[in-house]
Image (tube, grey):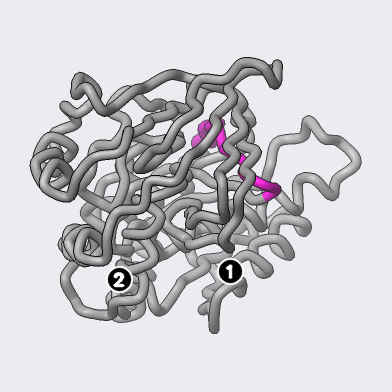
Amino acid sequence: MHKAPLSLLVNPAAARGRSLRRLPRVLALLRQAGVDPNVYLSSGPGDLEAEARRLAAAGTPLLVGGGDGSVHEVVNGLRAAAEETDDATAAPAPFGLIPVGTGNDFAKAAGIPLDWQMATRVLASRIAHALPPRRIDAGRMNGRWFANGAGVGFDAAVNRIAVGWRWPLGTAVYLGAVLRALADGVATPRMTITAGDRPEDVVWDAPLTLANIANGPWLGGMFHIAPMADHADGELDLVIAAPVSRRRILGLLPVLVRGAHLDEPEVSHRRVTRLWIEAESPVPSHLDGESQPLAARFEIEVVPRALALL
């Protein structure tokens, strides 16, 4: 039996409640491998972040049962705890993921099996054999951390619609949200994007449909937004879409699912470590699929090896 303190943080609302229904089986699989964690169920937004921060400060490794939203909260809690230490270079508390969410974009990027039972077995084996965690990058936007990606513009508007639906549609909820967002109209505000260490390094100064800043390749469970993205390469992948019509967006969707959109004339891509986005008026944004307050300025950077993944 694994003797060191270990906690399993579960978002019971993940995947429309399926995470809670799967919890008994998850615990059975962990215990079969000699891993017997303390279980913590979140009660609302921000709860997992606060608990992760508390446990990380005590040096307790964490397991997360949830999706990308759960990972987002835990990552912010872990990084907050790390920044409170006297040694800024110290490794953050490690965490492991059992993907029982809807999109599971971070799990895909990390090579974690999407079969939650298989993922539990693999994670339990790694813990039982005391395998060292992997160090991976994280991003930061306006003071908040993200593990998988950030978005400004149309994809953030789609995300706001998707998270508001409670229908059991799986990843198809994001496709439905795209169609609903198209019906509402596609905003193309003017934005100035500066990438690099100098404010004069402007890479975009025109209207746009979206700017996606990827640490991992996937968005919304089914969209291969940045096929080349690698969360251990010390860079972020900036994907910009120029203004396009509703019909053109519909035509681009299957191309985006295949990850073949980077050759389209409306799409541009570059690798960055730091960037600034300024919009002519407040626009929607998201971090790891979590909607953020409307804002007109975004400061974004990658922090290499900021996370430790079991």
Q: Position of residue 247 (x, y in %)?
A: 11, 47
Please identify the dominant SS of the magenta region: strand
Q: Residues within 10 Å of mark 2 (few under 14, many from 20)?
A: many
Q: Earlier in the sequence, mark 2 or mark 1?
A: 2
Q: Is residue 195 left or right of residue 20?
A: right
Kindly identify which residue carries mark 1: 48
Q: Residue at x 43, y 27 (%)?
A: 237
Q: Is residue 76 above or below residue 263?
A: below
Q: Position of residue 144 (x, y in %)?
A: 64, 51
Kindly identify which residue carries mark 2: 15
Circle 1: residue type: Leu
Residues at marks 2 and 1 touching, judged by CB atoms closer than 8 Å: no
Q: Which residues are magenta?
A: 131-143
Circle 2: residue type: Ala
Q: Is residue 120 above or below residue 89?
A: below
Q: Is residue 147 above or below residue 1?
A: above
Front residue of 26/43: it is 43
Q: Is residue 168 above or below residue 133?
A: below
